Amino acid sequence: MSRGALLVLADGRFPAGGHAHSGGAEAAVGAGRVTGAASLEDFCRGRLHTTGLVAAAVAAAAALGVDPGELDAAADARTPSPALRTAARRLGRQLLRAARVAWPSGELDALAGRFPKGAHQPVVLGVTARAAGLGPADAAYCAAYESVSGPASATVRLLGLDPFDATGVLARLAPEVDAVVSRAVGAARGAVGEGVDALPAASAPLLEVGAEAHAGWAVRLFAT
Amino acid sequence: MHLGHSLSHGGPDAVSAGARRPDGARRALRIGLGGPVGSGKTATVAALCRILRDEVSLAVVTNDIYTREDAEFLLREAVLPPERITAVETGACPHTAIRDDISANLEAVEDLEDEVGPLDLILVESGGDNLTATFSKGLVDAQIFVIDVAGGDDIPRKGGPGVTTADLLVVNKTDLAPHVGSDLARMAADARAQRAHLPVVFQSLRGEDGVRDVAAWVRERLAAWTA
Ligand SMILES: Nc1nc2c(ncn2[C@@H]2O[C@H](COP(=O)(O)OP(=O)(O)O)[C@@H](O)[C@H]2O)c(=O)[nH]1
Ligand SMILES: [Mg+2]
């Protein structure tokens, strides 16, 4: 693995469209569930162990070479909200665009040919990790970390939350990110032999419900 | 500069600053309109659509900050059929979506070409932002920066990337100059000093055919693009 390439891919400024998404934080702020650093930490912890774990496992499986089509279907099955499915594919398409320029590869080109309107973002993330010479744990780290860093930075904008407090939340969650990644990679290795049903299917109903409500808001800062 | 990043395998091209679409056809000329909130970007886009829609095949991408109001205004005014207007959501940071991370805008542009193409021209309106917001060359081929006389007649003097480097500077709402005490001659002199040989248009969209000069500039750009 190349630690340098991992930093490039994990950088929040990697131009793959993430800045327009709050990872459910805007809906949670609107519903009064996230009001400051403590509730942000609860929110992020919940997201990390549910959709974060699933995304990390899918990304790791893709990095291990599990068929992207099967993984995309598995991600769909684990994403009840149509709004979130659409967003995940849009983000996948945006990541693919950046990845193909950053790490040109036949696998990424083939993925673009097969999913011209985008595959679920974690699938693209895993294939991107392969193209960048990274492994399944690297891909899982990017997905797991992104599942909490997105809401944290969005909440800084939404609530005017002290950015140091938001970063403190992420630092405190870091050991849990490690744990989620090792679970995700274990499950992904299982999926290599047993198929995608071996992937975790943890879900966060409030995130799905909140995303559907949020998609109907007339005035919002973030796309999701 | 060629940014087409020729790729060996199938699938859509990764980036689309190159002048050709994956099928080899010439893509649409893309012109960005940036500038502060309320300066008249949407009004200019609407006026351009009305005057150019019978001459060329065109579409619009809007980047609203937290609503779809620009797209809705254009739809309500029926300046183009609805399928030719796409709104991009920008995550509270409109300048990011036109400069630092242009992926959502590139997607919108490509989808328009796929779905309603072939297109000659796509206008990309930035969500109103500050005076430093400019478009990436990976997204647009030329950019118009729109300011107005009511925002303060010292804006051309202050400069900034939009005022100084945009391919066309538009000073809008000249009809308001007497009411807000803006000195148009001074604005013109300051703009000339900041921009060397780059063009400046003063316009009022309240007047008959107010967008005439900007439309003429767009036509020149189109002629150069297809030459
Ligand atoms: N008086 C006057 N008002 C204008 C002119 N152009 C636009 N406006 C008005 O200025 C307001 C803001 O225009 P808009 O195009 O929405 O600005 P944007 O935020 O830059 O897109 C609207 O109420 C327009 O009708 C003009 O030339 N003169
Ligand atoms: Mg506007």
Image (spheres, coloured by chain):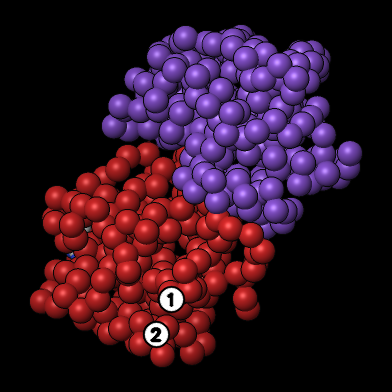
Q: Quadrant of the C terminus of chain B?
A: bottom left
Foreground of the two, B3 or B176: B3
Foreground of the two, A155 or B23: B23
Answer few, some or many: residues within 10 Å of disc 2's Cα (few below 14, many 20 plus, some between 14 and 19).
few
Instruction: Point out the residue furthest to the left here.
Output: B208
Evaluate whether residue A141 shows in this view.
yes
Residue indicated by mark 1: B26
Instruction: State the residue at coordinates (56%, 30%).
Output: A72
Q: Which chain is purple?
A: A
Foreground of the two, A197 or B89: A197
Answer few, some or many: residues within 10 Å of disc 1's Cα (few below 14, many 20 plus, some between 14 and 19).
some
Q: Secondary structure at mark 2?
A: helix
Residue B100 position in % (x across, y down): 59, 54
Q: Is residue B75 left or right of residue A179?
A: left
Q: Measured along the vertical axis of the image, is residue A87 above or below residue B14?
A: above
Instruction: State the residue at coordinates (46%, 85%).
Output: B198
Q: Which chain is red?
A: B
Q: Chain of mark 2?
A: B
Give the mark nearer the N terminus: 1 vs 2.
1
Determine if the C-beta at disc 2 is less than 8 A from ligand 2: no
Determine if the C-beta at disc 1 is less than 8 A from ligand 2: no
Task: Identify which amino acid the numbered label 1 is placed on.
Answer: Arg
Residue indicated by mark 2: B226
